[in-house]
Image (tube, rainbow, N blue to C red):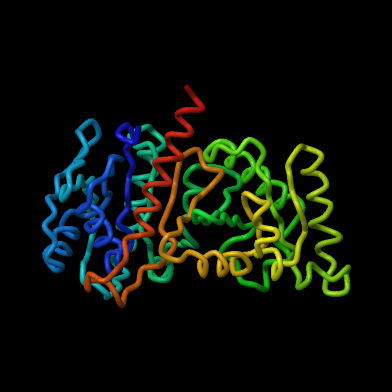
Amino acid sequence: MTESVCLALTAGEPAGIGPELCLQWAAGEREAGVVVVASQDLLESRAKQLGLDVTLTPWQPGNPVARGAGELSVYPVSGLASSQAGELDVDNSAYVVKTLETAAKGCLDGTFDGMVTAPVHKGVINDAGIAFSGHTEYLQELCGVERVVMMLATEELRVALVTTHLPLKDVAAAVTPERICQVARILDHDLKAFFGLARPRILVTGLNPHAGEGGHLGREEIEVIEPALAKLRSEGLTLTGPLPADTLFTPHWLDQADAVLAMYHDQGLPVLKYQGFGRAVNITLGLPIVRTSVDHGTALDLAGTGRADRGSLQTAIRVASEMVLSRKGAAS
């Protein structure tokens, strides 16, 4: 039962829509216990701005979690410099990273069963002098694991990535047999562990147009990808590819698959976001903790207007709860 689940929810960039999505989510009925890791002053200010009647209760480990409509437990984090909707402030960057650290360490020590993240603004964090390429990489380093996998999912489609936040000019060099094997093994393992798939069927894209056209449009498929897939198949993984990305995302192939493994960020994610933007979830695989996130950014232009759609956050919370219960079930 989801009543047994306690999730940390980080409110993300203070100037963005994350704080109000947390507040809007609290207005509805829910089963999973959720604790928002954020400045309580920020949430109170945004609730007042939007006219939302939400009761915020400071929370500490061991306390009961608010579960009623219009109630929200808050694990207070200090250090917020300003809270103006739509206006970035570099002085908030350390606070934003602190919310992530608090939630992740709470998952590692058992305070929380998993974490859900609202969007952050990578640019302003880096402008503050804090090296930050994304939630995925940050949590990889904090949890001390060699490799993690970014996977976005809707009800109909799952897309995982071999490389994530890299300039396009660096992608080909980063697509190595070792990396492909690491990512595919994590994807296969976690589809079994968290999604109940006994033998996941994974489609793999090529890197080049037409999957290299037999070497005429690039040799990475022949020299890098195909040998890696052959090795993985010998280990028992069910893989099809490398396939041209422009035809892989069609019913002919997708109806026979549980997930797609794409070589780079903008090869796989535009298709998924076109198919399900606003109801997709970003999942980090390969961590010792459960982590999901929304599929969108900070939407500074919508912050403070009340027009932000909480659909992706609801999906992220639901999927995190299901992953926690799946892991608990497998361990029992």
The quarter of the picture where residue 166 lies is bottom right
Q: Position of residue 316 (x, y in %)?
A: 40, 52
Return the residue nearer the eye: 84 or 307: 307
What percent of the width, then of the height, locates residue 39?
Answer: 21, 55
Instruction: Give the left or right position of residue 272, taking residue 5 as reference.
Output: right
Q: x%, y% of residue 130?
A: 42, 62
Q: Is residue 189 above or below residue 239?
A: above
Residue furthest bottom in the image:
301
Is residue 214 shown left or right of residue 310? right
Quarter residue 97 falls in = bottom left
* In front of the other: 186 or 313: 313
Can you see residue 129?
A: no
Q: Is residue 9 visible in the rendered structure shown here?
A: yes
Q: Name the residue: 47% across, 53% down.
A: 138
Please give left or right for residue 236 compared with residue 96 in the image: right
Q: Position of residue 257 (x, y in %)?
A: 66, 51
Q: Residue at x 35, y 32 (%)?
A: 1
Q: Nearer the viewer, residue 79 or 252?
A: 252
